[in-house]
C-alpha cells in the first residue's frame, strides 16, 4: 500500500511563503497526492535515467511514456543496457523548465528510485507489444505513416515502477513530498 510523507516547512520560511501567496498543501490521502503528481508527470516527457556498473554512474536523457505510475522507455541501444544487465537499480529525475529570475519559487521536479526491467520483441514479444500499446507507439507510428518498427534495430523497452518518488513544486504548494510504494 503506497504511503505519502510530507516534510514540514521550516518556521522561518512560512512568512516568506505567506508574502509570496504560497499555500502549502496538506496531502491527507495518497490518492490526492498521486493526482497532483500524475498531472506534473503527464506535462513532461523527458527523464534523466541514472544507471551504474563497476561503480561508474551514467545518466541518459530519455523520452518516457507513462501508464499509471509505471514509466516506459523505448530505446535502441547504448551503454545503459550493459549497466542494466548487471545492476537493475535505477534512479531518475524529471524537471520542468525553470526561470528563477521570473519566479524564484517556480522550480518543480521529481526524483525517483526503483528497479528497471528490460525486454525486447525477441525476449518477450507479448510484453513488448503490450508496452508499445500502453505507450501509444502504434498511434504515433500511424501518424508518421510507419507500419512497424524497423526490424534491423534491436528496440528494447525499459520499464520502471518506482519504489520511491520525491516531488517538489513550491509555487503550487507541494513542499518536499515523498511517495513510497510500500
Image: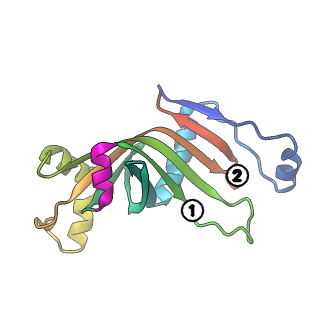
Front residue (pair 44, 32): 44
Q: Residues within 10 Å of mark 2 (few under 14, many from 20)?
A: many
Residue at horizontal 76%, vertical 47%? 23
Q: Residue 50: image x %, image y %?
A: 43, 53
From this view, report whether residue 173 is shown above or below residue 4: below
Question: SS at mark 1?
Answer: loop
Q: Which residues are magenta?
A: 78-87
Residue at horizontal 58%, vertical 54%? 109
Res 117 seen here: no
From this view, report whether residue 89 is shown above or below residue 105: above
Front residue (pair 93, 21): 93
Q: Residue 85: image x %, image y %?
A: 27, 46
Snapshot quadrant of residue 132: bottom left
Kindly identify which residue carries mark 2. Answer: 170
Front residue (pair 7, 53): 53
| Rendered image: mark on residue 140 | none
Kindly identify which residue carries mark 1. Answer: 96
Q: Residue furthest bottom?
A: 145
Residue at horizontal 77%, vertical 40%? 9
Q: Residue 68: image x %, image y %?
A: 40, 43
Q: Taken as a whole, is the magenta stretch helix, strand or loop? A: helix
Q: Is residue 86 magenta?
A: yes
Locate residue 104 relative to residue 111 in the image: left or right. right
Question: SS at mark 2?
Answer: helix
Q: Are marks 2 and 1 in contact (CB under 8 Å)?
A: no
Front residue (pair 52, 4): 52
Snapshot quadrant of residue 27: top right
Amino acid at each position: 500500500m503506497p504511503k505519502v510523507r510530507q516534510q514540514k516547512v521550516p518556521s522561518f520560511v512560512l512568512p516568506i511563503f505567506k508574502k509570496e501567496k504560497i499555500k502549502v498543501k496538506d496531502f491527507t490521502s495518497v490518492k490526492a497526492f498521486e493526482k497532483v503528481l500524475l498531472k506534473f508527470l503527464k506535462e513532461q516527457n523527458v527523464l534523466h535515467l541514472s544507471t551504474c556498473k563497476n561503480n561508474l554512474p551514467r545518466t541518459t536523457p530519455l523520452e518516457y511514456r507513462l501508464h499509471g505510475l509505471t514509466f516506459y522507455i523505448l530505446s535502441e541501444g547504448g551503454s545503459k543496457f550493459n549497466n542494466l544487465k548487471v545492476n537493475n537499480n535505477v534512479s531518475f529525475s524529471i524537471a520542468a523548465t525553470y526561470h528563477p529570475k521570473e519566479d524564484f519559487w517556480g522550480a518543480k521536479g521529481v526524483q525517483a528510485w526503483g528497479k528497471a526491467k528490460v525486454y525486447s520483441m525477441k525476449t518477450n514479444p507479448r510484453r513488448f507489444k503490450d508496452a508499445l500499446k500502453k505507450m501509444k507507439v502504434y498511434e504515433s507510428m500511424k501518424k508518421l505513416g510507419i507500419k512497424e518498427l524497423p526490424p534491423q534495430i534491436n528496440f528494447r523497452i525499459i520499464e520502471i515502477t518506482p519504489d520511491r518518488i520525491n516531488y517538489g513544486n513550491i509555487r503550487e504548494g507541494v513542499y518536499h513530498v515523498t511517495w513510497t510504494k510500500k
